[in-house]
Amino acid sequence: MAKILNYFFVLLFLFQNLLSAQIKVISLPQNQNGIFDPVFFDKNEFRNVELLISDWQIYYESDPQNKVTLSVPAVFEGEESLVFEKKISFSSAQIQNSQLVLGFLGLNYSAEIFLNGYNIYKHPGGSYPFEIALPNDILKENSIITVKIDNRLDSENSIPSLQRFLFPNLNGGIIRDVYIKTIPPFHIRYNSFTYSFDKTLTKTNIYFKVGIGKTVFGKNHQPSQAKQFLVRINLTQNGSFTNQSKNDFLQTIPASSNDFETDCKLEFSNLQLWSPETPNYYSCEVSLILDGQVVDKTIKQIALFDVEKDKDIIALNGNSFALQGTTYYLDETSLRRLNAYQKIKDDLTFIKNTGFNAVRFAKNYPNPYAIKICQELGLFALIELPINSIPEEILSRNDFQLRAVNSIKELANVYSEYGNTLLLGAGSSFLPNSEINQNFVSRLCDAVENKGFLTYASFCGLQTKPINKLDFYGLEIYSSPVDATKERIQNAIDAIGTPSIFISELTYPNYRGNLNGYLIKNSSDAQAKYFEDMINLFRKLKISGFFINTLLDFKGSTVSLYGGFSDNDIYKFCILDYSRNVNSIPYKVLNSKLTDNSKVTIPIGVPKDDSPLSFNLLPLFIALVMAVLFNVRKKFREDCTRALLRPYNFFADVRDHRIIAGVHSIFMMLIQASAGSLLITILLFYLKGNVLFEKLLLSFGSSTLIMVMSFLAWNPQTCFLILFPFFIIHFIVISFFVKIASFFIRTKVESLNIYYAVTWAFLPWVLLLPFELILYKVLVVGSFNTLLIITFIIYFFWILQRLQKAIYVIFDVRPAKVYFYSFLIIVLMAGGIILKYQLTNSTIYYISNAIKQYRAMIF
């Protein structure tokens, strides 16, 4: 009881906390060792990099006088724009003889960046890394860098959108390191490459595109004639140069050109190829030589591998291969002790040791350091735009498509600097076989076709139509039965081909923990059994791979129903929680399947009903009270009979002050409130893990709505205690509005009689009590759910009709008039709410999309 009351008070104070919440700025753990990885930050003897960690002034845009001093990374909660400001000193030599670059490894969400009061860059949104060349003409020896960050998302323009399903949490702010890079005025701007093999995979051609830039500081620094320079490219492994046919390329840059691109081709023999088993990679050193002197150098890690698809298999370096991966979500903004670099390395090493060969960074822009670690450990990294469940009405808009195209190009460019063992994704939860979704995905894949990466998209159902330029088709599975999954995947194989299909998300929630037996739904053993059966199925069908969703726990961006309600917003479908118990049955089974070790025995157990005991006791108790009153009080029995069978005469007696007892009406109100509260509680508890119900709630774009509904659904006892007074209040509120409406007619009726009429109009609630004893079990069976929906709709209209009859009888007005105005009020209220949310959050589009997605899912 104490726990129930605790939940009750938490919910009561929830709204107050939401309304009065202040933006809190928190510094995250810093990289205490300084720049520990020169290759990652591209630091060498020609390029200096300094982290801008300490002494940032942070304040609200609306209150610039109230400042706090913190270190970055730093994050905040709330939707008000926050300003990060730092004073930084440059030497005159730096300003006059170097190009200074301001770099961000990630901020969230959108930002405007100022240098000494001048707006130099507008970040459109997204936590991917980017760099800005600082204009030398506005630099000062004591300069001020200002970053204004806006953390707000919307429904139609931002990527991701406001309506996010099972997304990881990410607070606003500067979430990763900020640095100043000093590079020579004549420098390498970028270094991209593609490569190809001969049929035997022994000879490799690598095609480099090297961008050269010149920083012009004034007329005295402008070259008067064309300049010749050398581009030198060396590949090393473990400090040893490879055998190569040529590595120096003589180029000429015109005097009038500040930017120049050169193409270089290198030929190699017998290079060691990268694979998850042997993650060989090379350091690619590109040097810029002018007048015999090296003036700039950049180093990146590259890996060489060959992926081929035919009609039957996918091959890696000539050998049959399948992706065995997990999704990985890291809320860097929740770290308090371990810095992000160490956390990422520890997690990815653990994932690799478990037996996975790939990681899908789903629904977020990963820390670029994770890409580097994946390549070194031997993990394919799947990175994607955080586009999820976007309605067709928005996907078809040209402005949204252009924004997505620019974003995926940026995604390919920036993350390829940290590793190239990548697959690029267009997004997730696309509608399968939708022409609008297909055209959108095709356009994104076409935008990165020349980048040398394989592409994929994840669908909420099976895509059976080939999409131009798309390499892999992902399928999201949410607790779908094995047999139904097998049949549907086989249909897709027949249409598209085995190697093109993979499981992008295989999700099975573990709400109930270790209950000793896989016959207990949503238990640890049931999760282990489900993954074992599904992996066996995928291997039998020989599809290109699967991704478990997910190995490690994470905090969600919003409270979830399907993810399970928790006080700390941790979703309950991970294999391992914070304790990292590797002796748990799901982990042992998964590790066994991935590494082909001995089979792990999973106990069968006995099925157990998850319905609370209160679903049986409450209706029995309420029905018993009703039966006692009905049999002991003759007047009460007569009132109930007449109110149900002869409502017109009954309400006429109410109007004429003839038969109603106030005590009986109060008892009836309490019984009806109990019956109604219990009905809603049972329905919410049944829908607690329903994907469609959650997506419909998310369509309104309200975090408060989904939080309250999830809390009520997952806490049935508390739900009943909260709904009970609300049902009582609703009798009073309806009576109040009926009283207000009576001012517009001549007949005057006392408020108490209105209350009596309203209370007895809802008498059919009581008839549900016997049915509520078995309602949850009937819902779980599922065979009669359509019939139940129809019954509830009819029941609702019956009660509405009784309420309307009560009104026109006690006020002695024409029924048509009451029906018309009742219908008008309902339409205006419901329509007004929907219109408001449609205009602000495109709710109708998202509701329609949620229904289409649900129809496409496998059940």
Image (spheres, rainbow, N blue to C red):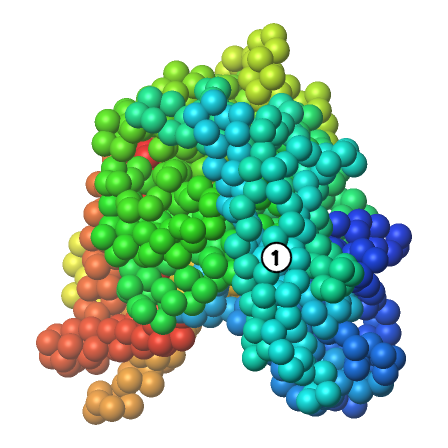
Query: In the rendered view, does 292 fall on the left or right side of 485?
Result: right
**Quadrant of the rendered structure where residue 395 is?**
bottom left
Foreground residue among 834 and 129:
129
Does residue 317 appear anywhere in the picture?
yes
In the picture shown, does residue 276 fall above or below 657? above
Foreground residue among 728 and 389:
389
Q: Quadrant of the C terminus?
A: top left
Foreground residue among 719 and 236:
236
Foreground residue among 74 and 48:
48
For the point 74% across and 64% down, the residue is: 291
Query: In the rendered view, does 243 fall on the left or right side of 730?
Result: right
For the point 12% across and 75% down, the residue is: 815
Does residue 638 appear anywhere in the picture?
no
Mark 1, other Cα within 10 Å: few <14 / some 14–19 / many ≥20: few
Query: In the rendered view, does 104 fall on the left or right side of 304?
Result: right
For the point 58% across and 29% down, the residue is: 269
The furthest residue to the top:
598
For the point 30% across and 37% down, the residue is: 462
Q: Which residue is mark 1?
A: 250
Image x and y of residue 544, in percent: 42, 28
Query: In the rendered view, does 639 fall on the left or right side of 663?
Result: left
Image x and y of residue 854, in percent: 32, 45
Secondary structure of residue under mark 1: strand
The amino acid type found where label 1 is placed reads: Leu
Image x and y of residue 574, in percent: 59, 36
